[in-house]
Amino acid sequence: MGLFDKLKAAFTRTTSTLSDEIRRIVTRSPKLTAENLEELEAALLKADLGLATTQQILGAARTAFETQGRAGIDFIEIAAREVERNLAGLDPSLGRQPSGFTIVSVVGVNGTGKTTTCAKLAHRAQLKGESAVLAACDTFRAAAVEQLKLWGGRLDIPVIAGAPNADPAAVAHDAITAADARKAQWLFVDTAGRLHTKSNLMAELQKVHRVIGKKSPGAPHETLLVLDGSTGLNALNQAREFHKAVTLTGLVVTKLDGTSKGGAIVAIQKELGIPVKFIGVGEQPDDLQPFNAKEFADALFEAR
């Protein structure tokens, strides 16, 4: 199954409602009236596209109707292309350092799938013939360390871990030393899940990043926020607060295989200008896929 088909399957609950509702509204009247504009706005907002993107789509539709009339106008196609335009403006690739190894810090609230994401990112590096090391810096949750070790054993990737309740910054420090000794090309740092509203926990994350930066100047080179796709626009608040605490370079959106909130991705990138780099559409190692703006937009609106 290709990425488009996986995305389309993932968004079944969103698109079956969104596209059907849009078609119902636009086929009812030959004109774009104030009434059906209001209905279209409600449908788009319900899909968590956010106010800015919703207004952008409606503006593009108004322009098309004014210049071309109803004939030949496909509102779903207009919506898909506006979403694609928003998402395609930023680089979704994971940046490699020209020399040495690249350190990627993976952050987020509890339960978003950070540990699994770290393992899957390391697996992607492996598939390209590049070596990786995993750092188990979620030291206050024993299950997270064990989970990362299980992934490491399954994928044959070394995992650097400390004693239970060890200082996560110290584990990160040791992991950098280990990655350097192994001549690794990637180090993926699994940080503890933390509520974005807890200032003490955010300060702890900042400490981890300071230690990483002292040990390896300029690092972490990438800081990826993992978001649960099922949380909808609640994820926007998470992204805002994490971006204030540690500069984010990208988003990873997981659990899209069971969500009806896919439009939130658009709202987050529209407001914060942080590119979506990967999306998760399943549990298998290869179900973490590089983000593709066109395929995402087409799947969201069932356009092609």
Image: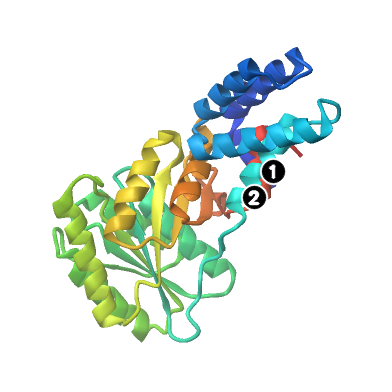
> Where does the image place residue 181, in percent across and percent down from the top left?
35, 85
Q: Residue 81 has which mark? A: 1
Q: Which residue is mark 2?
A: 85
Under circle 1, the secondary element is helix
Q: Residue at x 52, y 36 (%)?
A: 49
| 161, above or below 211, in the image | above
Q: Residue 134 has which mark? A: none
| 259, above or below 3, in the image | above
Under circle 2, the secondary element is helix
Q: Residue at x 70, y 16 (%)?
A: 24
**Image quarter (top left, top right, bottom left or bottom right) of the C terminus:** top right
The residue positioned farthest toward the top in the image shown = 28
Labelled pair 1, 2 in contact (Cβ < 8 Å): yes
Asked whether residue 5 is in view, the answer is no
Q: Residue at x 23, y 67 (%)?
A: 208
Asked whether residue 58 is in view, the answer is yes
| 124, above or below 142, in the image | below
> Where does the image place residue 124, in percent across and percent down from the top left?
54, 63
The residue positioned farthest toward the front in the image shown = 66
Rate crowding at label 2 as few (under 14), some (14 to 19) or many (20 or more) other CA atoms within 10 Å.
some
Res 214 → quadrant: bottom left
Q: Is residue 35 left or right of residue 222?
A: right
**Image quarter (top left, top right, bottom left or bottom right) of the N terminus:** top right
Looking at the picture, which amino acid does disc 1 mark?
Arg
Real-space CA distance between mark 1 and mark 2, rounded to the nearest whole angstrom: 6 Å
| 132, above or below 193, in the image | below
Q: Nearer the viewer, residue 57 or 119?
A: 57
> Where does the image place residue 253, in percent across and percent down from the top left?
47, 47
